[in-house]
Image (cartoon, rainbow, N blue to C red):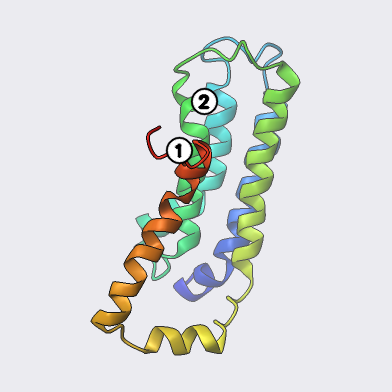
Amino acid sequence: MDSAAREKYGPLLGLATTVLGLLTALLIFPEAPSPQGALIVPASILALGIAFVPAMRAITYSNTMMNADNFIAVGYVGWLLLDLIQGAYDLSDANDNSLRLALIAVGVSAASMWIGAMGRPWALPQWLLNVARNPLDSRAVERLIPICFFLGMLNYMYSVNFNLVE
């Protein structure tokens, strides 16, 4: 398959491998998934399905190697599945059906990401392009710093009922 076809059909291949990985993981899902390490194999299979296209693109030095969908796919593996792959702790606080549904949720979410990558990106709104084209002068930055600080601290202030001592 030439590089143009790989670039065009990469998201479709990602969708197919993710769905295949999810179905395979569900087929071998253990009866008792709560003990430590019980979900290593199903999570690894799902992770391989999700990360197949980014790995293929990295190995072949594809032009699409730095696309956002590759980073998102690797993020699914690193942030959502890596704890299950490592089998670092038991999951006795979660019931068995919830663990199966969580694995399904990760797989469906990753498949949805690949579906989204199939389409063309939306054009940015004109007003946003105009704002981005204008450089900020020092006066604008001086006015934005307190606003950004306030917005950044708002969540913390709200959590302590705006009591600055707390």
Residue at 50% across, 60% down: 69
Of 68 and 53, the residue lying toward us? 68
Q: x and y percent of residue 42 in the render?
A: 60, 27
Q: Is residue 116 above or below residue 132?
A: above
Q: Would you call the spot at circle 1 few (<14 residues within 10 Å), some (14-19), or many (20 or more)?
A: few
For mark 1, what is the residue?
163
Disc 2 marks a residue whose amino acid type is: Leu
Q: x and y percent of residue 2 in the render?
A: 47, 72
Residue at 56% across, 72% down: 8
Q: Which numbered disc flags the more N-terminal residue, 1 or 2? A: 2
Q: x and y percent of residue 162 in the render?
A: 48, 42
Q: Residue 79, can we see it?
A: yes
Disc 1 marks a residue whose amino acid type is: Asn
For mark 2, what is the residue?
84
Q: Nearer the viewer, mark 1 or mark 2?
A: 1
Residue at 49% across, 53% down: 72
Of 97 and 46, the residue lying toward us? 97
Of 129 and 111, the residue lying toward us? 129
Q: Would you call the spot at circle 2 few (<14 residues within 10 Å), some (14-19), or many (20 or more)?
A: many
